[in-house]
């Protein structure tokens, strides 16, 4: 697995390189946004770790340029923790956002999730199982402990959007457009209501969620690992 | 100011003969008579012509009354000077005709000249008034502080209006503002003019003449009101300016605070990110670090801890400066020795950049706090090294410059555009050409605070190669002067 790291801090580049190499990733590091975009084109990495505060081009712009020609998973690493920065980066096409300082385990877990999602040769299973929860994507059926869970079409569409993007941080805007349609994007109260309904029906506890995690002000993430 | 408007209008005086006009009226025909006598024997026609000329001259020169007096004089003188040519009857009618003609000339010319003079006076007065108002508005709108401008305004009104005292009292957004000017004893006729902008009264202007002076005329009152309107406009502008400045200051302060906040956040988190990534990686039991990798991570952690420590030190220094606790402990100090030590330190820290140190052989000691100057030099050199390209040279040069020791630190970096050269000393300022994550954005701010506390100055110059030179002066130890 080849990882391209774009960060203008030599120390963080070194720390990332060493840590990732210890996990048998092949690591290439560059210090500017331009080199990052060119690097994605030339090296075709499996994962891009991208800092936002770059000396030449802003990281969000780098995401936009990369997305013009590549679907490589992008994880943003930034000290910026404002929701607007996160949303901008995710809406530009980033897959995930990790705030500095971060623990290596967390970054590695996010990286694994992103890489798994990007596996093209692994066909999406028609039936997904998360513990006692079973989702049959072909028949659009959801059962919990063998009992059918009755979902409205909107609730099902929301669930489908989440489970088909496991581990990915999905922004409010993205979810609204995907579930409600192109004309939507700011109606976060709809989303909040439906996520609450979904959690209730699926038996997920909002205070310690095992299925859907809320990223305040940014969006939602499906965190459950599929079983078997 | 040579503008005087306190003068009775010409028109009012026109119907009363002045001494000057009577003198002219008497003098001109006398001269004419003397001329006529001198030219004796004089023909009748010539005599009439001479007196006609005299009346014309008198009327044009002295106005109506001079002309009339000259006409009377000429009428009386003509029969005496010119021998009767053909009988008393004819003589009487001739003199009568001459008298009527003289009088007609005098009156017509006198009135015409009088009107023209009036016009001229009016034009002159208007010009004086315009000049006064222009001068006043120039003073008021000169961008001076409202208090100073108002004082000057009051002062400027004294002479043109013949005032003993002029007082202005206004209230700008609740702030009372007073200005006054005096010239001798007041207590005479006075005039109170309200200062109004739009419908809002801002205050009053009180103009007072000395005891026994004449009261204010209608024209003067109007002019005083016009002058007051100028003051009102200027005050209104000052008020709006003050509001705008306050709003701008507010915006700048909150902007600075926001910049400071994001800067501190960024600067503290960046080294923390490397440290945390390193530590968590070392703690990760699933990772297989070889000894080289462990060493790499530990080195990173160590370096970033130092960096964090320096940053915290800088922030504390800045806090100290802001609290006014930065007082230099001056001792006679050889700055070249400090420079040598700092350069040595920087060389070991940044081997990829060449640091060159040159100084005059007999550099006088400076009256400085050695610890603080060490910090200034360290900050300047760190900056220079950071902005240098790999393999570049940083040149440190020390020399005497008058009563100061001048230190110049020049790099071969990208340089600073002229419009940013002042801003680099502001806290958390980062040049557009500098990498975002380089310094703390405090080095030059601290350097400037220290140099200023020493009574020196610090500035940015361009180098011949397009790089940046930061130069500072600190005073020489007195004993060397």
Image: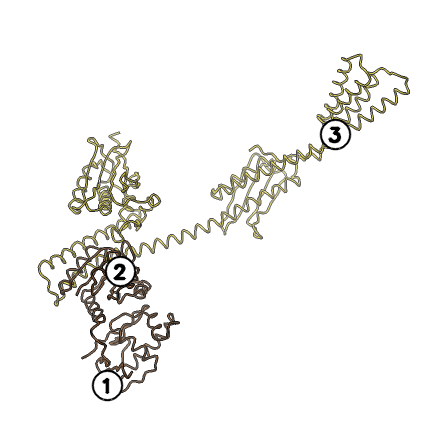
Chain colours: A brown, B yellow
Q: Nearer the viewer, residue B475 or B346?
A: B346
Q: Nearer the viewer, residue B193 or A30?
A: A30
Quadrant of the frame with the C terminus of chain A: bottom left
In which chain is the residue bearing label 1? A
The reply to whether residue B269 is visible in this rendering is no
In which chain is the residue bearing label 3? B
Real-space CA distance between mark 3 and mark 2, rounded to the nearest whole angstrom: 94 Å
Of labels 1 and 2, earlier in sequence is 2
Dot 1 and dot 2 within a common chain:
yes
Residue A79 image label: 2
Which quadrant of the view contains residue A223?
bottom left
Which quadrant of the view contains residue A195?
bottom left
Which quadrant of the view contains residue A211?
bottom left
Real-space CA distance between mark 1 and mark 2, rounded to the nearest whole angstrom: 42 Å
Pointer 1: what residue? A145
Would you call the spot at circle 2 few (<14 residues within 10 Å), some (14-19), or many (20 or more)? many
Dot 3 and dot 2 within a common chain:
no
The picture places residue A48, in percent across and down from the top left corner, at: 22, 63
Asked if labels 2 and 1 touch by Cβ distance under 8 angstroms, the answer is no
Real-space CA distance between mark 3 and mark 1, rounded to the nearest whole angstrom: 124 Å
Residue furthest bottom as drawn:
A147
The picture places residue B431, in percent across and down from the top left corner, at: 30, 49
The picture places residue B293, in percent across and down from the top left corner, at: 11, 59
In which chain is the residue bearing label 2? A
Dot 3 and dot 1 within a common chain:
no
Residue at figure coordinates x 30%, y 38% from the top left: B456
- Side of B84 where A155 appears, left or right: left
The reply to whether residue A200 is visible in this rendering is yes
Pointer 3: what residue? B110
Asked if labels 2 and 3 touch by Cβ distance under 8 angstroms, the answer is no
Considering only vertical position in the picture, is B303 above or below B116? below
């Amino acid at each position: 697995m080849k990882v391209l790291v774009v960060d203008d801090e030599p120390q963080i580049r070194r720390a990332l390189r060493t840590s990732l190499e210890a996990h048998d990733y092949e690591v290439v590091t560059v210090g500017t946004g331009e080199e990052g975009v060119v690097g994605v084109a030339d090296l075709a990495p499996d994962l891009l770790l991208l800092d936002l505060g770059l000396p030449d081009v802003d990281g969000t712009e780098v995401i936009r340029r990369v997305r013009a020609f590549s679907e490589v998973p992008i994880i943003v690493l930034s000290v910026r923790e404002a929701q607007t920065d996160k949303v901008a980066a995710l809406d530009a096409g980033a897959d995930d956002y990790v705030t500095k300082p971060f623990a290596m385990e967390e970054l590695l877990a996010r990286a694994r999730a992103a890489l798994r999602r990007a596996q093209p040769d692994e066909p999406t299973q028609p039936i997904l199982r998360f513990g006692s929860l079973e989702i049959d994507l072909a028949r659009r059926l959801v059962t919990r402990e063998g009992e059918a869970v009755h979902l409205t079409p909107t609730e099902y569409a929301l669930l489908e959007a989440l489970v088909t993007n496991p581990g990915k941080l999905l922004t409010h805007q993205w979810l609204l457009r995907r579930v409600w349609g192109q004309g939507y994007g700011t109606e976060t109260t709809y989303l909040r209501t439906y996520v609450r309904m979904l959690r209730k029906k699926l038996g997920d506890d909002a205070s310690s969620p095992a299925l859907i995690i809320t990223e305040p002000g940014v969006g939602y993430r499906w965190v459950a690992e599929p079983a078997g | 100011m040579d503008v005087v408007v306190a003068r009775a209008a010409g028109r009012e005086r026109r119907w009363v003969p002045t001494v000057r006009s009577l003198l002219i009226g008497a003098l001109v025909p006398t001269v004419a008579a003397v001329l006529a006598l001198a030219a004796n024997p004089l023909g009748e026609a010539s005599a009439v012509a001479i007196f006609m000329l005299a009346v014309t001259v008198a009327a044009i020169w002295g106005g109506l009354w001079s002309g009339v007096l000259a006409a009377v004089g000429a009428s009386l003188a003509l029969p005496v000077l010119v021998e009767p040519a053909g009988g008393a009857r004819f003589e009487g009618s001739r003199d009568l005709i001459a008298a009527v003609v003289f009088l007609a000339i005098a009156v017509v010319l006198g009135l015409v000249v009088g009107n023209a003079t009036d016009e001229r006076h009016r034009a002159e007065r208007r010009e004086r008034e315009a000049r006064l108002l222009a001068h006043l508005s120039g003073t008021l709108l000169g961008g001076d502080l409202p208090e100073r401008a108002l004082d000057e305004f009051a002062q400027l009104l004294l002479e043109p209006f013949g005032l003993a005292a002029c007082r202005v009292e206004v209230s700008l957004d609740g702030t009372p503002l007073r200005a006054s000017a005096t010239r001798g004893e007041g207590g005479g006729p006075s005039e109170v003019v309200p200062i109004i902008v739009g419908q809002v009264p801002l205050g009053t202007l009180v103009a007072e003449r000395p005891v026994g002076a004449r009261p204010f005329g209608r024209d003067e009152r109007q002019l005083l009101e016009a002058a007051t309107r100028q003051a009102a406009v200027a005050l209104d502008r000052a008020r709006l300016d003050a509001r705008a400045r306050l709003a701008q200051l507010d915006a700048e302060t909150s902007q600075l605070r926001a910049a400071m906040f994001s800067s501190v956040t960024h600067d503290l988190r960046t080294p923390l990110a490397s440290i945390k990534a390193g530590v968590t990686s070392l703690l990760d039991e699933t990772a297989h670090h070889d000894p080289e990798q462990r060493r790499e991570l530990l080195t990173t952690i160590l370096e970033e801890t130092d960096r964090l420590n320096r940053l915290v030190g800088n922030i504390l220094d800045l806090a100290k400066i802001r609290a006014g606790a930065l007082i230099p402990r001056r001792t006679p100090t050889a700055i070249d020795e400090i420079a040598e030590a700092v350069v040595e330190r920087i060389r070991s820290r940044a081997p990829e950049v060449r640091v060159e140190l040159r100084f005059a052989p007999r550099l006088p000691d400076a009256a400085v706090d050695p610890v603080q100057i060490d910090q200034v030099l360290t900050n300047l050199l760190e900056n220079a090294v950071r902005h240098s390209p790999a393999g570049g040279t940083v040149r440190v040069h020390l020399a005497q410059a008058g009563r100061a020791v001048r230190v110049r630190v020049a790099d071969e970096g990208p340089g600073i555009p002229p419009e940013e050269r002042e801003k680099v000393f502001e806290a958390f300022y980062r040049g557009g050409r500098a990498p975002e994550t380089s310094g703390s954005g405090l080095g030059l701010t601290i350097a400037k605070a220290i140099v200023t506390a020493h009574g020196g100055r610090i500035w940015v110059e361009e180098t011949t190669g397009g790089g940046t030179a930061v130069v500072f002066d600190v005073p020489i130890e007195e004993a060397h002067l």
